[in-house]
Image (spheres, rainbow, N blue to C red):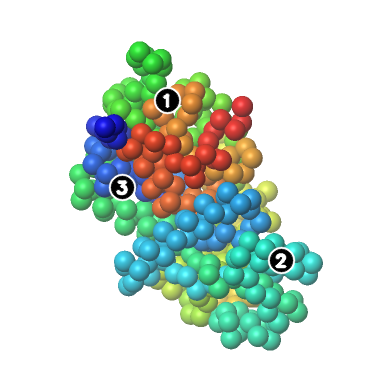
Amino acid sequence: MSQAPLPPASVAVLGGGVLGLSTAVQLLRGGADVLLVTEAEVDSGASGRSLSWLNAGGGYGEDYYRLRMSGIDRYRTLLAQHPGIDWLAFDGGLYWDDDPFTVVERHNAQSRQGYDARMLEREDVPGFVPGVDPGVLPHRVLANPGEGWVSLPHLVRHLAEEFTLRGGTLIEHAGLCTVTRGADDDGVRARGLRTAGGEEYAADAVVVACGAGTPAVLAAAGIDLPDASDPAMLVISEPVEHGLRAVLNTPRISLRPHPGGRLAMDSTWYLDRVQRRGDGGWDVDPEVPAELAAEASRVLAGHPEVVPQSWHPGLKPVPGDGEPVLGELDALPGCWAVFTHSGATLGLIAGELVAGEILTGRRHPVLDPFRAERFR
């Protein structure tokens, strides 16, 4: 009788954001010895810059839609297990646009997929979505009661605690790392990681989950992964009495509650005023956070004074075709890529499925549409 393959004795995970830690924790739960390596500190990358709106209503294809719905399901399970947390909530979403036909088309597309989508008259919004000034709304808006949000820095800390308790090994400030390779009877495969300082760590399997840096790491290993990563910036407010519970997506701002009575805000209109310097740092027009905060005040009921406390610019990880890249690389066996714009919604499910492939030695069919080989 055939037996299931034994899990690899050791796995090296590159990336200290939600995707890296989620994968690492699942591997530890499955009995692997896990080394987590980060370029700087845990949660110093894209996970700290994400609005982290949990949704599946963006007109996605069926495979991507189902994956995102599975991602939302895992967050609901997490919330049921930890009902007291203040960094994860499912209080719905509200969407509107200057073009009413865009809103109707979005509603119709969502409804065809069975997504919970409801058109609301402006005067009915306060009863469904507290904290919004109905005077700023068009006549009809789209409500999605099943949507939610998560603060990824809080989730990363939650996962990091479990990672430590389960005996994972963490190496921070490793600099730009590379995947090491070696040959065996079956050809060349991933063998571990090498840090910027030249330290090498052998492993039976490698996971590259370092956000917008993933294509460059894989390019150094001979893997060409199309990259459309672009700038983004999240602004966090000082504590404010705002009354908002849902996630808002409007023509000028995306807005959600944040732990500590704060608000998290972003948009796209200011990205030409967020510039990357040659040394890798970022320059931000100092007026942008204040302008974004003023827009938040405008759409909120009572127009509270919203004061920006911090802002976090950086690259938003986006694969070349916009869809996730998940799974083992045919061109480099033993190396798994986890690269997606949907790091929040897929944060838990992607780690679960990738770790499951590594631990069982069997490809998961849910990941088949998202493998890097589609770019060939």
Q: Nearer the viewer, residue 292 or 244?
A: 244
Rendered-image quadrant of the N terminus: top left
Which quadrant of the figure has residue 208? Answer: top left
First in sequence: mark 2 or mark 1?
2
Q: Which residue is mark 1?
A: 333
Q: Going 41% across and 41% down the picture, which residue do you hit? A: 354
Say if mark 3 contacts mark 2, CB within 8 Å. no
User: Marks 2/1: CA distance?
Assistant: 42 Å
Q: Is residue 209 visible?
A: no
Q: Going 45% across and 24% down the picture, which residue do you hit? A: 332
What is the three-letter code of the residue carrying label 2? Asn
Which quadrant of the figure has residue 249? Answer: bottom right
Residue 207: x %, y % from top left? 39, 35
What is the three-letter code of the residue carrying label 3? Val
Q: Residue furthest front?
A: 1
Horizontally, residue 76 falls left or right of residue 7, namely right
Q: Which mark is residue 25?
A: 3
- Say if 189 sits above or below 278 in the image: above
Horizontally, residue 359 falls left or right of residue 327, namely left
Q: Which mark is residue 108?
A: 2
Q: Is residue 33 visible?
A: yes
